[in-house]
Image (cartoon, rainbow, N blue to C red):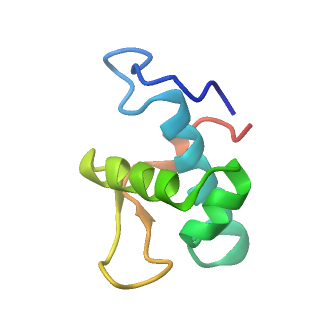
Amino acid sequence: MGVEGQAAVKSERDPFTTRQGQYLAFIHLYTKLHRQPPAEADIGRYFHVTPPTVHSMLVSLERRGLISRRPGESRSVRLLIDPASLPKLD
């Protein structure tokens, strides 16, 4: 799952950090398996992090244009990038 403190982007060509890539890969795989996007609680359980940590990551991913969400609607997260560009989920 990577190191918690990793914040630097691997290279200028990568649009996301290693940790962000893991969140994106989880969102993609969860959606594919369950035919609906994960709730923030699902993401938190998988990564063993608190609800504020999950929310902060989703806000960051949305700000970077990697996902979209609909305010006030649960399970509304959608990837805005090609799934082929995602890393394998650790």
Q: Quadrant of the N terminus?
A: top right
Question: Would you say 42 lies left or right of 74 here?
Answer: right
Q: Quadrant of the C terminus?
A: top right
Question: Would you say 30 lies left or right of 70 here?
Answer: right
Q: Residue at x 57, y 73 (%)?
A: 39
Q: How many marks?
A: 0
Closer-to-camera residue (52/32): 52
Q: Residue at x 34, y 84 (%)?
A: 72
Residue placed furthest toward the top: 11
The quarter of the displayed image where residue 34 is located: bottom right
Relative vertical location of residue 6 with respect to residue 73 in this rendering, above or below: above
Question: Would you say 38 lies left or right of 77 here?
Answer: right
The quarter of the displayed image where residue 11 is located: top left
Q: Residue at x 63, y 58 (%)?
A: 44
Relative vertical location of residue 36 with respect to residue 49 in this rendering, above or below: below
The quarter of the displayed image where residue 71 is located: bottom left
Picture coordinates of residue 31, whole percent (x, y)? 61, 68
Picture coordinates of residue 86, whole percent (x, y)? 54, 40
Residue placed furthest toward the bottom: 73
Q: Residue at x 44, y 59 (%)?
A: 55
Picture coordinates of residue 32, whole percent (x, y)? 65, 67
Picture coordinates of residue 46, whole percent (x, y)? 72, 55
Relative vertical location of residue 25 with respect to residue 31 in this rendering, above or below: above
Closer-to-camera residue (89/59): 59
